[in-house]
Image (cartoon, helix red, strand yellow):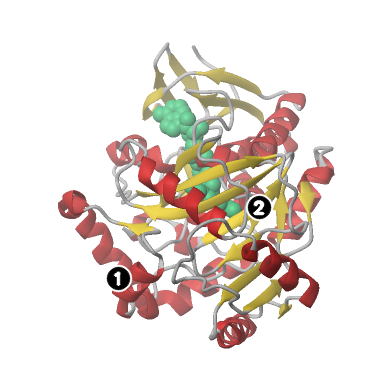
Amino acid sequence: MVRDDTVAVVGAGVIGAAVAYALTREGRAVLLLDRAEPGMTGASFGNAGHIAAELVEPLPSWGLLFGFWRELFAFGGALDIPLRRAPEFLPWARRFAAAARHRAENTRQLAPLVKPAVGHMARWLAEVGRPELLRINGHFQVWFGPRSDERAAEQGLAMERLGIPTQAAPNEILQVIARQSARSLEPRTSLRPKNARVAGLWFTSTAHVLDPLKIVQSFVGAALQRGASFERTEVRTIKPLDGRIALHTSSETLTVDAVVVCTGAWTASLLEPLGLRVPMESARGYHVEMAGQPALTDAPILYADSRILVTPMEGRLRASSFMEFAGHHAAPDPRKLARLRTRLRDLGYGCPADGPSWVGSRPVLPDYLPGIGRLEHTSIFYAVGHQHIGLTLAPVTGELISDLVASRQPRHDISAFDLRRF
Ligand SMILES: Cc1cc2nc3c(=O)[nH]c(=O)nc-3n(C[C@H](O)[C@H](O)[C@H](O)COP(=O)(O)OP(=O)(O)OC[C@H]3O[C@@H](n4cnc5c(N)ncnc54)[C@H](O)[C@@H]3O)c2cc1C
C-alpha cells in the first residue's frame, strides 16, 4: 500500500511514541508501527521511572575498567556477564573499553540533552494533558555502614564537578530509612550491618513518573489525536525505493516518504542490511513490584550498596536492579528475582516471595551514546540506543528527529550520535 506524505515510525516504545508525537505536532502524517500494543514489550514498559537528569556521563570510564572486579563484587551480582557469551560479547566490550578514553568529550555531547530533561518532560506532559504523572521531588542516594558519610561526600563532590546539584539528605528521611531497615526480617548481609549508620544525598534536579507505560500511552494518545494512526505489525525489512521507502511487514509492503527506526534493542537486524554497523547489546534489568506498600518518601531511593532503585509508582513500589548481558533472547533468571526480593526484605520492605516481576533490555551501544541520525542520501532516520536513560531523553529525542525530518539544523549538535561512528 502506498501512503502519501507519510512518515512511518517503527517501534512504539517511549522513543517511538515521543518521535510520533513530535512529528504530529509539526503537522506531519504519521504511521506508528509496532508488533505489540504501544509500550507493552520493550524496556519502556518496566523501567524505573526515574527522570535521570544527573546521568550525564556515559558509563565507560577508567574508574570502571580499573575497578571492574571490585565493581563486580560490589554489585553483589548486579553485573552479570555469562562466560558462554564471551565470543560475541568481547568485541562490544573492547569498544566499551575504548570509549573510556573519550568520556569527557562524550559527556560534553550527552549532558546538554540530559540536564534539562525534567523541565522538558514537564512541558510535554502538560501539553498532552497528563502533568500529574510527573513528580518533581528529586531522588535520594543512600549508603549504609561506617564509610557511608565519606561515600556520600565523594559522590556529592563528583556531582558538583559535573554541575549536578545535590544536598545532604534531610535527617528525617535518613531516620525513616534507618528505622525501616532495622525492621528487617532477613539475616543481615555484609552490605548493611545491623544498626549501621546511614548517609545520603538528595539529588534535587531529578524527578520520577508514576507509571512509565502511561507515559508511552499519553504520547501515543496525543499523536493519535493529532491524526497519526497505529498499526500492529512487525517490520521485517526497510529499503529505499525510487526516492521513497518500502517497508516489508508481516502483513504487507508499505511505501512511505520517510521512516524513523525506534526499535530499541532489536535495531541491528533492521539497520545493518542498509550498510550501518549497529553494535547494540541489551543490558537487561529486572524489577519486582510491591503492591499497596506506602512509599518512605515521595521520591525514588537508590540504595547504593546493593544497587537497587525503589520508585514510588501508582498503588505500588517498583524496585529495579541488575545489569545482565545474557543476550536479548535469554530466559529470565529466577535467581536474580529471588535475590532482589531478599535484599528488599533485608532493607525492611515487606516484599512477598512472589508477585509482579519483569525483565527488559536496555538498548546499549558500546560508547553509551545514543544513535540519532539519518542514513546518508535517504529519508531513513533512526533514534536508538538510549541505554539507561531512554525515558529521560524521550522528549528531546522526539524534537531532534523532527528537526532532522524537516531538514532543519538540529537544536543540539548531534554529530556524535551518528551511527557511522562504528
Ligand atoms: C530495568 C530498567 C530500568 C530502567 N530505568 C530507567 C529510568 O529510570 N529512567 C530512564 O530514563 N530510563 C530507564 N531505563 C531505560 C529505558 O527504559 C530505555 O532506554 C527505553 O525504554 C528505550 O526505549 P525504546 O523506545 O528505544 O525501546 P523499547 O521500549 O524497547 O521499544 C522498542 C519497541 O520496538 C518494537 N519493535 C522492535 N522491532 C520491531 C519490528 N521489527 N517491527 C515492529 N516493532 C518492533 C518493540 O516491540 C518495542 O515496542 C531502564 C531500563 C531498564 C531495563
- Alpha carbon separation for disc pair 2 and 1: 31 Å
Residue 44 percent location from the top left of the image: 56, 41
SS of the residue under disc 2 = strand
Position of residue 306 measured from the top left corner of the image (x, y, whole percent): 49, 64
* Mark identifier at residue 7: none
Along the viewing direction, whichever of 198 and 152 lies nearer the viewer: 198
Q: Position of residue 308 (x, y in %)?
A: 53, 59
Relative to 367, say whether 209 is above or below: above
* Mark 2 crowdedness (10 Å alpha carbons): few <14, some 14-19, many ≥20: many
Which numbered circle lies on residue 311? Answer: 2
Local SS, label 1: helix
Q: Residue at x 53, y 85 (%)?
A: 147
- Quadrant of the image occupied by residue 144: bottom right
Amino acid type shown at disc 1: Ala
**Which sits in the foreground, 8 or 190?**
190
Q: Position of residue 394 (x, y in %)?
A: 62, 48
Q: Which corner quadrant holds the C terminus?
A: bottom left
Q: Amino acid under label 2?
A: Thr
The residue shown at (58%, 60%) is 347
Could you tell me if residue 268 is visible in this image? yes
In screen coordinates, is 43 left or right of 212? left
Q: Nearer the viewer, mark 2 or mark 1?
A: 2
- How many dots with numbers? 2
Find residue 163 and report its image quarter: bottom right
Residue 25's place in the image compared with 374, above or below, is: above
Q: Which residue is mark 1?
A: 97
Say if residue 260 shows up in the picture: no
